[in-house]
Structures are given as structure tokens and as C-alpha cells.
Amino acid sequence: MLTFNRRGARAALLAGAALLPVAASAQTAPAAPPPAADAAPATADDDAQDVIVVTGTTTRDRPLITASADITLADRADIDRRAPRSTADMLELVPGIFVEATAGQVSNNYSVRGLQGGGQRFVQLEEDGMPILYGGGGADFFFDQDLTIDRLEAVKGGSSGVLTVNGAGATINFISRRPNFKEAEGAARVSAYNYGMKRGEFYYSQPLSENLAFNVGGYIQSSPGVRENPFDYAGWRLKGMLEYRFDDGGYARLSAKGGDVENAYYATMPYRFDGGKVRGIPGLDTQDGNVGGDAFANIAVPVSTFAHPGGFREFRYRDGIKAKIAQVRFDIEKPLSDSIDLFAHARYLKYSYDFNGLFPGSGTGNAGLTTAQNYLTPGASSPINDLLTLGARAFPNTVRFGIKNLRTGVVLGQNQTAELGALNGNGFLQRTVLNHDYIDGRDFGANVGGRWEVDTGSFKNSLTAGVMYYNVKRSQDQSATASVVNGVQTNSDIYDIVALDAGNNVIGTLSDNGLVSYGDWGAGIRDRKDSAVSLYVNDEVAIGDLRIDGGVRWESDDATARDGNTLAVNQPVPAGVGGVVRNVGSSFDGTYAVRQRTQRKASWTVGANYLLTPNFSVYARYANGFQTNNVDPITTIELYEAGVRYQYGRWFSGSATVFRTNFDNQNYNFANPTNPSQQQNLNADLRTKGVEIDFVVRPTTWFSVDFQGVFQDPQLLNLELDGVDQGAGFEGNRPERTPAQLFTILPTLTLPNGVGDIYARYKFVGKIFADNGNGIALPSYGVTGIGVNLNLSQRVQLNLNADNVFDVVGLTEGNPRQGQTQAITDGFFYARGIVGPTYGGTLTFRF
């Protein structure tokens, strides 16, 4: 959404590092030299329509009000006012992006314009104009905002699908600070929050000569995560940049970054409906509860020796998600004449993440959440009845079954009804999946091309053409996914299932240190390779007050998928492993099924903008784009939009956009809820129509109100499960995890004499459905945050902020691994929720 009069950014020059193929220097007058990247923002008296936009456009000198794309700008002040604790928090600065920021600092989900939640498709995250990852998904593992980031620019639809890969729905570009060629400068920041997060950041830049300068920055941090956790996760990131400016314009820039960061992860947990209200289960608080803890610190899981020769793979909750990156990048832009520029951008990224996450209720769903009494009673009501059957055969003298707390050693038998009923304060046990997922990858990307501009006064034309090349490889090891029986409480205990005699003495152990199954999600070994070439061209024409632009990108992707085959006869568990489960379950046999496929597709767009007055413009746009999916079918998106933009002095600036989005053949796999080691396939079409609104009202010089919102009607059509048409059962339903209303209100009070400002933020998320069958409706909720920015001196700033100050309960998803139709069982269900009140702040020193 286009807001061209943001506080602090309303007249900033968007210089360098353009969003898409051209990192063009922008200027307010074509004849003027490019401004320094560290140039101070223009004064508030500057006309907002003079703001130059490069995001979503390829013209060097195009004011934001004349753009024919749906563009958002958030400068450093906007970012600091949001006080983001994750990349997902920053994405909420972009109207129309629905963010499920409940997984922790990383691994969150985001979607655009009515696409079902739970993924990251069609949204490309970029850093300085290049995708963080070619495929888009998972980029938040390898990017964090810190003092090295100058601003955020985003474009939804429009030229996004032409000027980048796998970003047809939206491209969100995080633009770094450029080196200072005038003088040395630096900043240091410390942050702390009530849940235990501690962070230190720094930034420093200095000229080395008239034409050469560098900067360097990064952070160190530690945090247990926003929910209760006995472990602390630490990490660091470092980024540096060396830039040379040519005497006749343009630059050459070498940059690098590296890091090793750990983070907590949260999946679903049990909730209950009581009198129409969402409530927690005693012993597991909705706002800061977390079943993970000491019991899950390190668990050895038996696995196929083809996957791990030693026969074991460790699940390490104490490590959380450990993401490592090492990247080197080179950028050059050089004018050949007043009308022709050439550019080349290339980067190589080596990355990995080691994911250790708990998934309560996965596969078993609500059936796995029941009383300890039911667990220990053989029959259909027990989620571990198969295990009890094996136990009865292995230990024929069994009188009853019981549980043994692995931490305390306490044994409770099935006949101890009072003690079992008081277990954890709620009497419940559950099945929790241990998901250990390791990714190792490399991602090379290059974008080379040129721009030719003609300006005769009444006629301007800017033609940009280029080629993009991406070569990526990604290896995955998700073997040894297993499940345990644990309590339903914070820092829960794991229980062995034991066979007891008449005196409740243990005569045998059915489980293996709490593990009741192995190979829950199949072999889990796979490789993916892509070699993709894109040719693109984008042309922008200005005739008087009319601007017309269009572009096309053609991509060819040579893809290879290697999927580990499953053992025909499961291997026995390694020697010394206890319990009655005597094989490692569905697991890797050492061979691969190889699929290769070359797919070619073109995306294109055309748009127009007409400036009715210097402060009022209208625009319209059509875009047809796509998402590559390795060897799986390409998925497509079709976007129609039309909008108006208006500014009235300092009093008002804003825009409204109506849109229609067609997502065709959305295809993805998910675990079969009755047999999680098997995958099911969903294919469906989605149709969304809606309106986006974004405006700023400033009735006085000391008070303003920002509003951003989307109001939409998403519908599901032609849904197939494993190729079988589901007919009217899903037709017209709301896609899963997609709100119809989503808006944010941000009032700001500016304090006198430049002291700072006070702000509040209210975010409303409308009702969502947990499943495509629309069986569970998760209620709407609104979250309030407050904050204050204080300039303690010219060089010292303090930000204090709090989020969810009214302790609202909000749910962002149900149990996606339970299937496409979900239900509430005996008042209980699984979901993933926002956390309760958090507060803290930052102290920044500039020098």
C-alpha cells in the first residue's frame, strides 16, 4: 500500500539498493548527481510527491505518487516504533500481509491477499534487492533486522512477479545502510525484555578515501524465548560492506555476512472452549506456557543405520533452532552514458539450520489429548492401545499398566485414580512428536542487465532488461522423528509406560525412555536442486501526467528431487534399546527415488498511473505470476487491482486499493492424520476480492493517526484430496488460517522541543478457520501495544515498549497436522497462540 508521507520518510530519498533488478541511485532532478547514501532526510516542508521510489519500479527518477504498483515504505523510525522482536513483526508494517508470529523469533508463517495461512508462498523476502533464498520460504531463519538495516520497502503484486523470482504476491526488501563517505559515524544499542531477551548491537562506518568507504555492524543476543523455558539460546550475526564510488557515477561494492544463532520454537498446544471463550488447561498457561523443558533436553532416538550409521540420532531441545550462515556478495552499477546504465549483482550463500521442535498433538490430534486413566486402559479410548497390546504379550503376568515419571521415578498404576486425576493439575497426558529437521544448503544468485532511458521533456521512457540465474541445492535430514508420552504442563515431564503386578511393582517397561513410536513421519531424507534462468524486461513510459508500464519475465527451471526410499522391512532397534517396539519404524533404506523435471513459465504485468493533480493520482494494474516448486507443478497467481492516492498538505495522505486475486492449483502435501508417516496431497483454487486502506491523518503538528487495513472475502474452490474431488463439502469455504479483516491503528503524540513521541498500536485480526472444512473457528482478537521514544540527548535515545498490555488470548492456527477437517473433542483442541504481556526497551548511543 502506498503511503507517501510517512513520518521521517515522507521526503527521504530512496537511494541505492533498489528492490528488484536495479539498485538504482535516485535523485530529485535528473541532472543532479546521485546523493550520498547517508544524506540527511529532506525537511518536512518538502512536497511528499517529490519522494523518489525505486521499489517496484525501474526508472531512476520516479516519485512515489506516480507509481502504478502497491508500494509500502517503512523507514528506521517506523521500524523502531514497531519495536520488532522478529522478522515477522516487521512484516506487519506491510498492509495486507497476514503474519502468524507465534512460533517465536523465527519459522513464522506469512501470506498475502487471501492465500491460506501456514506458508510463505508467493512472498519473497529480499535484502538489498536480492532474494535471501531463491525459493523464498525459510528466509527468516537467515535474516534479522539490526542497526545495519536502514528501511523496509515492499511491493504487493504489480511488478513483483516480473522483477524477482518466487515473489508474485509480494516482495519485501530490507535495505541496508550504505557506507558514509563524509565522516565516521557509529551507533551502539542494548535491548532487554521481561522474558529474558538480551541483545547488544553496533554499527560503524568510515570513509577510507574520497571514493572508498566501509561499514560493519551486527549483534549478539541470548534469549529463552517468549514462553517459559529453562534453556537460554544465544547467537550472533555480523555484516560488513566495502564500497567504491566511480568518479563518473556508479559504484562497486563488496559485502559479506555470517552468523550462528539459536532460537526457541513453539508449535501448537492444548486449549479448551468454555462458555464460548478460549481458555487454557490448568497447569499450562495460554499466555506463557510451554510443554518443552528439561525432560526434552537431549533424547537419543533409534533410526535406520542408512540414515545414521550409529543407529541413533539425538533430539536436542536445548539447542532449539540453530541457524548458520556465511555469505559473500558483489554489486556493481556503472553508467556508460547519460542514458545507459549497466548493473550486476551476485551473491553466494552457504547456510544450514538444525531444527529441534516439539509438536504436541501432531498426527494423533485431539485423540492424543486425554486423561492418564484413558491412556492406561486398553481399548479404543487409549491413544497407545497398540503399545499396550504389545506390552500384554511381552509381559503376560501384567495385572495393569502404569506410568513412570522419568525425572522423579514415581510410578502410578491404573488403579490409582485419584493420583492420576491430579496429575499435572489436570489429569491429562498427550502424545508429542520430536521433530529433528536438519537442512544444509547453498544458494547462488546473479542478476545482470542494463537500463536505457530517454527524456525529451514531454516524453520519458525507461527500458530495463536483464538475466537472472539461480543455482541452489538443499539437503534435508528429518529422520528419527518419534513421539513420547508427556504431561500437559509447562516444563512437562516425560513418562515411561510400564507393566505392573498386583502390588504396582514394575515387571516390564513398554516404552524406551518415554519413546512410544519411531519413524513417525517416514524416511525424512531428501535433496532438492534447482538451476533456474530468467530473462526479463520492464518498460516504463511517461507522457505528461500519464505513466504506463509493463514487464515480462520468462523462467526455465531445471529441477531434481531425490527422495529417500522407505525400508521394506524395518530394521530392528539397536542393541540395548528397551521397550516392546522392536524396530525403528518407517525409515530410510539407503536408496533414492529420483525425479527430474524442466518447467518453463512466463509472468507478466501491465499497469498505468494518471496524475489528476499534483496531489491526487489513480492507478490500475494486472499481474500474472507464479511460484516454482522444484519438480512439483508450478502454482500461479493472477492479480487485479485499482487504487487512488491522495494528499492534502500535512493533514492527510493515503490510498485505497480494490483487488481481486486468483490463486490457481495451490498444491501442497501434509501428513495423513491417521498415518503421519504417509503424505496426502491437497490441490485447490482460491478466489479473493477485497480492499486495502492505508492513510495518515495529522490534525495538528503534534498528533497523528496511522491506519492500515485489509478487508477481504477469500473463498475455496475445486478442492481435491489425493486427486479426489471433494465436491460441495469445501466449495465456497474460507481457506484455512485466513482472516477476512485485518487492520492496525497507530496514534502518535509528538512531544515538544524534539523530546520524542508517545504511541499506541492496536492490531485486530478477524476470525479464522483452523481447517479448510471450516470445522473450527478461532475467534477474532485485538492486541494493544504502547511505547515511548525519548531523545535523552542529541546522541542518546531510549525506547520503552509493551505489547499485548491487556493480556488478550489470540490464536493463529489450529492443528495443521490433524487434517483438512478438524473438530473440538470434549471441549478441547490444539492451536498456536500469541503470548501475554511483554515489555522492555532499547537504549541507543550514536557517535
Image: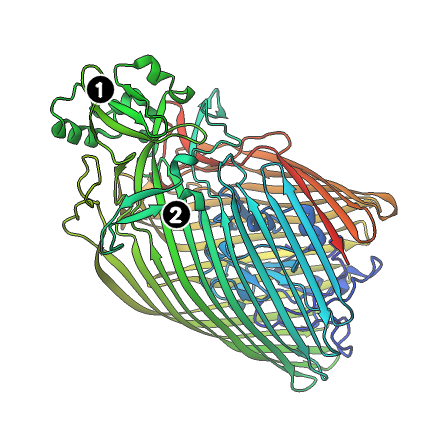
Disc sitting over residue 717 in the figure? 2
Q: Nearer the viewer, residue 232 or 154?
A: 232
- Residue 114 drawn at (x, y percent): 49, 48
| Identity of the residue drawn at 74% across and 78% down | 209
Secondary structure type for disc 2: strand
Secondary structure type for disc 1: loop
Kindly check if marks 1 and 2 are in contact, taking CB atoms under 8 A apart as contact. no
Quadrant of the frame with the C terminus: bottom right
Residue 811 is at least partly visible in this image: yes
Q: Nearer the viewer, residue 371 or 264?
A: 264
Q: Earlier in the sequence, mark 1 or mark 2?
A: 1
- Residue 789 drawn at (x, y percent): 75, 44
Circle 2 crowding by C-alpha within 10 Å: few under 14, some 14–19, many from 20 = many
Quadrant of the frame with the N terminus: bottom right
Disc sitting over residue 138 in the figure? none
Residue located beneath label 1 in the image? 505
Q: Nearer the viewer, residue 8 or 743?
A: 8
- Residue 30 drawn at (x, y percent): 75, 77
* Residue 249 vertical placement versus 698 (above, below): below
| Identity of the residue drawn at 58% across and 37% down | 195
